[in-house]
Image (cartoon, rainbow, N blue to C red):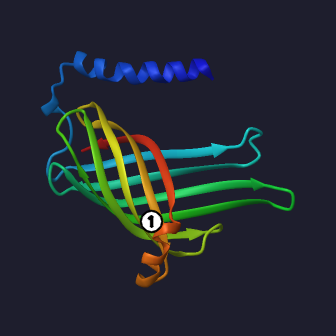
Amino acid sequence: MKKFSLALCASAIMIPAYSQAQGMSSHDFGPHTGDREFSLSGTGTSNKDFDNSSFGVSADLGWYLSDRTVAGVRQSIQYADITGEDLTDDFWNGSTRGYIDYHFGTQAARPFVGASLGAIYGDGVKDTGTAGLEAGLKYYVLSSTYILARAEYQFLFDSGSSASDNFDDGAWAYVFGIGFNY
């Protein structure tokens, strides 16, 4: 595990050096008004015995309204395999959300903030509406290719009045992935 962590850190350090070696300057990175983006992200957890595990995949398709603002649709799918004293079951959940994000800066590293609104559904949840706030970072390793880290605070609601009541009972969702502008 130590060797894997060391290799991951070394790779992350080499990305900016590789970009500079390719002769890219800050104005060569990122999207422009009218461009689209596609990203694919994943997340997962397991206990030490791998008998309680979950993983998820999220795909985003967005359109740049300006050089800094993207709006789009996000589809996420999660799977959980839970084993306990009186329980052995598999759960599939999904969510479909619209999102809008605002990006800061013009360099290779582009932090962003945003919001999403949609619905969740599946085996392990009650079918309901969801809303959330998000923040993250896109790091351009090539002129139109980036790695992505995002954290979302999501809360569930059945109606407008329950949305404000449920904000304090939200949950965090984290993803790491890769994306492309075209």
Question: Residue 91 appears at what percent x and percent y?
Answer: 67, 61
Given residues 42 and 2, the one toward you in this image is 2
Given residues 14 and 159, the one toward you in this image is 159
* Residue type at tag 1: Thr
Residue at x 71%, y 43% (from the top left corner): 47
The residue beneath circle 1 is 96
Task: Count up the numbered dots.
Answer: 1
- Label 1: how many residues lie within 10 Å, few (<14), some (14-19) or many (20+)? many
- Location of residue 48 by image quarter: top right
* Residue 123 drawn above or below residue 141: below
Q: At numbered mark 1, what does the secondary structure look like: helix, strand or loop?
A: strand
Residue at x 38%, y 41% (from the top left corner): 148
User: Viewed as shown, does residue 75 lie left or right of 85?
Assistant: left
Given residues 101 and 34, the one toward you in this image is 101
* Residue 114 drawn above or below residue 11: below
Question: Residue 9 appears at what percent x and percent y?
Answer: 46, 22
Question: Residue 79 appears at what percent x and percent y?
Answer: 63, 55
Given residues 138 and 160, the one toward you in this image is 160
User: Viewed as shown, does residue 19 lie left or right of 5?
Assistant: left
Question: Residue 159 appears at what percent x and percent y?
Answer: 45, 83
